[in-house]
Image (cartoon, rainbow, N blue to C red):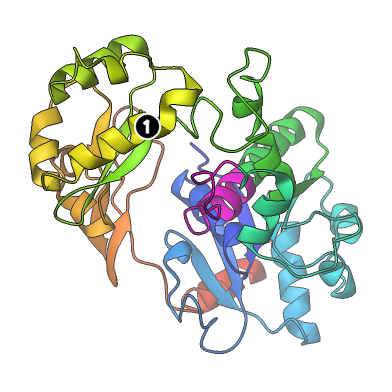
Amino acid sequence: MLSGLRVVEFEGLGPAPFAAMMLAELGADVIVIHRPGPGNPVAGARNLLDRGKRSIVLDLKDAADIATARALIARSDALIEGFRPGVMEKLGLGPEEMHAMNRRLVYGRMTGWGQDGPRSMTAGHDLNYIATSGALWYAGAPGHAPQTPATLVGDVGGGALYLVAGVLAGLLGAARSGRGTVVDAAIVDGSAHMMALLMSMMPSGHLAMARGESLLDGAHWSRVYACACGGWLSVQCLEPQFYAEFLSRMGLSDDPRLAAQHETAQWPEQTRILATLFETEPLSHWTALFAGSDACVAPVLRPDEAARDPHMAARSVWQMAGRGLSPAPAPRFDGQCQTVTPPPERGQHGDEIRAWLDNTV
């Protein structure tokens, strides 16, 4: 879908390279500027998030390499960087200078705290950002510390995906007006914005400020339960017809203790009843019991187990590529699932990129 568009990415960690990977898998020619050296210690020399990209190694402390970076930016539609505010300006690669030589450029900036504000220059990580934005508050049972899937809610959900949306919107705007824009994608902004779905339930009384009293964070029918084997089972039968199907499969349709689905005062005892039942059988038993039903129950799987799940396998959601298991690109177009390509070696395309620059104006 993005064939013909060129994106320059400055090597970073987490959400910025994830966003660039997604643009590459949507068809853009993404050129990642790697720093000299073996790569960051978290991702290693061949970063999974570099798949689908071309790589050139540039030393941004070297004047000649800075000139090469400028030449790439001048010939590109978009730029992605994830440095602290002001770093690109110090390199002479800030938005004002880059727009002066490429007025159509969409300049994508990825940070945790944003380009301004009291914390904009301080360090932070995914958990800090979603804690501050409010997105972490409902993640966990009352009386227990909030927990969240590592890097998913902040770095990916509130960060990378918002940067992708911003860059795509900027590209559409540039196509109409001939002028680029600066996209300020901050994880605190995006993760707070994602709360709109929950906040929409507040007028109806289904969202409370206290943990454990809202529609989706305290109910016995919206939980993960332990099984006899040590496995875990997710249950989230929100609608009454699905709750009825859940009770029927469990043989609890006539149990008066579970008849009231939405009485919050009964949720703790109803949770205890279900927890006791689920601990009597292994995960395989419950998976078989709910198979093919509308009870909204599913096992909690490790990635390698998910790859073997019949539904996931049928859609080729997990694939083997490069160093091991890798998720397939998403979304799909016209029902086609892309094949995962391994990430390039650092600097693998340096010669061809320089040759192309030498032959273009």
Label 1: how many residues lie within 10 Å, few (<14), some (14-19) or many (20+)?
few
The quadrant of the image that shows the C terminus is: bottom right
Name which quarter of the figure residue 115 lies in: bottom right
Q: Residue at x 63, y 43 (%)?
A: 135
**What SS does tag 1 mark?**
helix
- Is residue 186 placed above or below 290 in the rendered structure? below
Query: Mark 1 sits on what residue?
Result: 269
Above or below 89: residue 2? above
Residue 77 place in picture, x, y as percent:
68, 48
Q: Is residue 294 visible?
A: no
Q: Position of residue 324 (x, y in %)?
A: 26, 68
The magenta span reads: 138-161
Does the magenta-highlighted stretch encompass residue 260? no
Q: Is residue 216 left or right of residue 56?
A: left
Drawn side of residue 49 relative to residue 242, left or right: right
- How many labels were placed on the picture? 1
Looking at the picture, how far across and down is residue 282, in whole percent? Answer: 11, 48
Q: With 147 as the anchor, is 344 left or right in this view? A: left
Residue 137 visible? The answer is yes
For the residue pair 179 and 239, the one nearer the viewer reads as: 239
Q: Amino acid at mark 1?
A: Glu
Q: Residue at x 65, y 80 (%)?
A: 58
